Image (spheres, coloured by chain):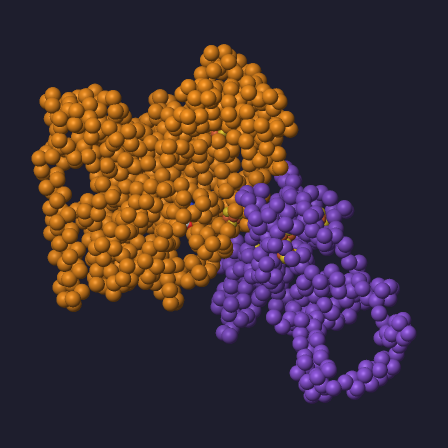
Chain colours: A orange, B purple
Amino acid sequence: MALPPELGRQDRLEPTEGEKTVNLDQRIQSAKDNWKAEQEGDDVRVYVGSATCGLAAGARGILNQLPGILADLNIEAQIVPVGCIGMCFAEPLVDIQEPGKPRVSYRNVSSEVLPSILEGQLKNGGPPKEWVFGTLGEGHYGELGRLEEMAVLAPQRRIALRNCGWIDPTLLDHYLARDGYVGLQRALGMKPEEVIQEVVDSGLRGRGGGGFPTGLKWSFCRKAKGDQKYLICNADEGDPGAFMDRSVLEGDPHAVLEGMAIAAYAIGASVAYIYIRAEYPLAVQRLLHAMDQMREIGVLGKDLLGSGFDLEIKIKQGAGAFVCGEETALIASIEGQRGMPRPRPPFPANQGLFGKPSNVNNVETLGNVASILREGSKWYSGFGTTESPGTKTFALTGKVNNPGLIEVPMGITLREVVYGVGGGVLDGRPFKAAQTGGPSGGCLPEQFLDMPIEYASLAKAGSIMGSGGLVIMDDLTCTVDIARYFLTFTQNESCGKCTPCRVGTKEMLTILERICDGKGQEGDIELLEELGDSIKKASLCGLGQTAPNPTLTTIKYFREEYEAHIRDHTCPGQTCKALLPVDSEATLVHTGLIRMTADRCDACGKCVEACAVAHSESKDPELAMNEDPLPRPRVRLQPVRGVTVPTSCRHCEAAACVLVCPTGAMAKTGQGGPVLCDDDVCIGCSACVIACPYGVPEAYLEGEKITKCDLCIDRLDKGGIPACVEACPTTCLEWVKR
Amino acid sequence: MAEVTLTIDGQSVKADEGMTILEAANAVGIHIPTLCWDPDLVPYGGCRLCIVQVEGLRGLPPSCTTQVADGMVVITENEEILTTRRLVVRLQLADHPVDCLNCRGNLDCGLQKLSRGLGIYGHGLPPTGREGTQDDSNAVFVRDMSKCVLCARCVRTCHEIVGVGAIELVGRGLGTEPAPFLAKDIRSSSCESCGECVVHCPTGALTFVNPHPVPATEANTVCPFCGTGCGITLGARNGKVVSARGNRDSPVNKGVLCVKGRFGSFEYVNHEDRLTTPMIRKAGELVEASWDEALELVATKLKAVKPSEFGAFTSAKVANEDNYLLQKFTRAVMKTNNIDHCARL
Ligand SMILES: Cc1cc2nc3c(=O)[nH]c(=O)nc-3n(C[C@H](O)[C@H](O)[C@H](O)COP(=O)(O)O)c2cc1C
Ligand code: SF4
Ligand code: SF4
Ligand code: SF4
Ligand code: SF4
Ligand code: FES
Ligand code: FES
């Protein structure tokens, strides 16, 4: 596709400067030609979803074995590793595309079935139906259903995620072929104020949680006086269970970088920062690689595309504190100080990084900007509603059949998301509530299923849009317990600066804990409301100002559940252990616990060693040492207040790790049973690592899998006891039957 | 500086641009309670006691960090503000040991003043039971973090005034506390024991091991320890010097003292070994003498030496003016350049 004339800018340039632009145009054209040739050529192409989630689900093995399998079958094909398409529940996803036909997508593919799939589609006259998920792209492939028409994709509109899963994120040409950097080219031909107006007209609002109109924010920074201005891309993404920003950065890094270049030009910033959590190594690698490619075509460095505008981008890795996502704390962190918010005003637009005018935007916000500049504000505001134009990505998790990453137009109803895209509530159970906005958001009951998802209506219901966490709960979820879980998170993450948040959330948590423990008192609900109300008003930053939301909304919509805990000593969601009828333990799988008595620990390390051996291939202490990978212990000796004690999983009843796990890999095996992680289902997203209050789950194999204590389930099956307990010489660890 | 006019509690108030609401209110005698605010430090906005309402601003902004603007309308007290302030203090009390009578901070405590001022008797919340680090490793002050209200005045003092940065806030959530940076106790940190943090701590969390008694009279003088010449205020009781504190009006130190000035500046005054008259050695014995006798002796001896036989050595503990005079004396009177100083490196 040639550039529409009004978008080209050759005519507006001096000839010498024009040269570079022509080069970019030529480069885009040749990228498109190559893309077209690839699409229409005679090559068979095999796409493998290779973002962190896909790799973790097994895509790495598939990528390794694919060349061999193809050679064995004597098939010539091109292998294309692509980003996350969002359907985490179906990973590993492998698509096969024959020349001139749409991609045929296969779900949950393993290396074992891959040869039969390839042979079936390419040799034996047709895709083997038992593994087919659907087709992707224009046109039909026989009778096969088109994913775009199925409930899971049909309601979705992809702008921020438009390239994720379609292009190889490491290839600049793929990005260019899909009109990459056309938006920047157009922006550089406009006055900065015109660029800002375009974004104002699009109605884009911040996707990082606050929802502040993006164009307006840019104009503040543009107008602020200062010799140096900064643009900051907020890629901290600390909400437990959220991974939208990571997927965009891994699957389409150039989209964010192009958005940054446009924003920097608009506000007049010659230096930009990307503040990204250190837990996202692949995203960092992709960004660095993409930045090198940008220099090649002159869209980074000095004199971008001959416009006279200079831009440098720096990457700053954060240590993963939730509060560092708050813009003023983030700025402090980049400056090398403790990540603590400071009161606004002064706003960063006037006094931000190093005291200079700065503009902070979320990854997804910036991910939309290039498309707005390329297609125009009218096009963008055609999606969504008048109040909230555009689309929004969500990390859909919880008790839903199709968890994963979705992008839907604003104004879609919760029902369409849960029952359409999400494929309904798991096991066909009744829907109870949806939590939007993570620990800052609210819990919305059934009556809101038909409410449109947009900023105003969510706020009216007592919740927030947030950055895109969306947890679905069924009738077997206890809302008091949910409130307790989120407050545990916010209390742990409070920076400690202001009293209402530091002490207030602890007070609320203590009260919620005693309610869950069956020790709630009359007046507790009112006290929670009083505390919550004041904490919201008096806290310094958004963390404290929103921390009471999950509690206040669950009280508002599920007050009778709180009352049942306090007055009747029952838990309607059948979750709070202390309130369950005793005989429900009759169905327990393994009813035992490891008891640890801290002052008996000699720190001898025998438990650690025994655990590693018990989880080795050989189960032999000598041989285990030479195994590759080395067997990993699930128990650690940790210094706690001056003494060293063994710590391993508590196998919590309402485990935080289970709640946030997007795939259901982490699961509680029955009431009182152990919390186990199913390796085959785990996609390594590390949500549990972040969520567990005790730091139990650990990522290994470069973050592809999780290890944690499994209570030695195989030994228990054989009537044994956990290896650590058996090895402990001092009875610090004991096995207690329940 | 430009002047702005704003309304505080219905009263029209003039203030300089760049002032905070708190400063503007204080200037006209309107009292706003504070805990983390300290006139010597950059505003912090952490304790949330100084919250007010400002027309057009969301929520309850802290007056200690919010700057005045022309036409601003501020309310410093109403039912909503008071309830919220009370809740903040109640939270502090729920997070505080009930031990006032045994506390060195008793009757000089910011938390006590606040709860009395806001009329709080009993907080009605579950106690947090936070234990807080106890650190008595330092010879001159004790750190009892269970009493810390997290105002960060100590941390800010050590960074902003002292420039040492021995302490920093560490941890998250309720476990956050000021702690020696990268060290296990304050003694093994880079702390210089100046005690400035103790002076700025509003509660009994930081207290001196030997608190000075309350003096009956006070007098301004200059610290005798080094040439800096810090202004110091000594207090006396029963004819003896019993206390020392920095003199805020001194342009040299603006009230700040170092470890020597704060803890060592007066104890020798009443010490039995202290020389109170000149001494002259007579027949191998040091004997007390009058000033006239001593000066006469020195003058006689100096007159007897040639310039090349004379040398003077002076000290950094002496004031600049005295050092200047001695070198003038050496060069102009003794006619030699044989003058040196202990700090000539
Ligand atoms: C506790 C807290 C955590 C936050 N975490 C993030 C985050 O991880 N990513 C993000 O983009 N914004 C986060 N925000 C919002 C930012 O402060 C800021 O509003 C946002 O980055 C602005 O970008 P936007 O206007 O594009 O949304 C957080 C805010 C708070 C109060
Ligand atoms: S609200 Fe919480 S996270 Fe925010 S400044 Fe206060 S203590 Fe820190
Ligand atoms: S610091 Fe103040 S409130 Fe706390 S115990 Fe001491 S005197 Fe009482
Ligand atoms: S005594 Fe002085 S140096 Fe030591 S921590 Fe306090 S302010 Fe810092
Ligand atoms: S020790 Fe004192 S000065 Fe330091 S934060 Fe605690 S209460 Fe404030
Ligand atoms: S499941 Fe045991 S601590 Fe998370
Ligand atoms: S005095 Fe203003 S917030 Fe503490």
- Quarter of the image where ligand 4 sits: bottom right
Q: Quick check: A351 left or right of B193?
A: left
Depth check: A728 or A494 in front?
A728
Instruction: Please give the name of the residue rendered at 65% of the width and 68% of the height, measured from the top-left corner.
Output: B254
Q: Position of residue A634 (x, y in %)?
A: 48, 27
Residue B302 visible, this orientation: yes
Q: Position of residue A484 (x, y in %)?
A: 51, 33
**Is A193 placed above or below B279 here?**
above
For the point 43% across and 47% down, the residue is A318
Locate the C terminus of chain A and report the quarter of the image it occupies.
top right
Quarter of the figure with residue A351: bottom left
Residue A383: % across, % down: 25, 45
**From what the image shows, is residue A715 above or below residue A1?**
above
Decide which of B110, B140 is in the foreground and name it.
Answer: B140
The vertical placement of B300 against A208, above or below, is: below
The residue located at (70%, 75%) in the rendering is B314
Q: Residue at x 15, y 32 (%)?
A: A77
Number of numbered callouts drawn: 0
- In the displayed structure, does residue B112 sit left or right of residue A208? right
Q: Is residue A564 visible?
A: no
Q: Does residue A711 sit above or below A11 in this rendering?
A: above
Residue A38, position as x, y percentages in the image: 12, 40
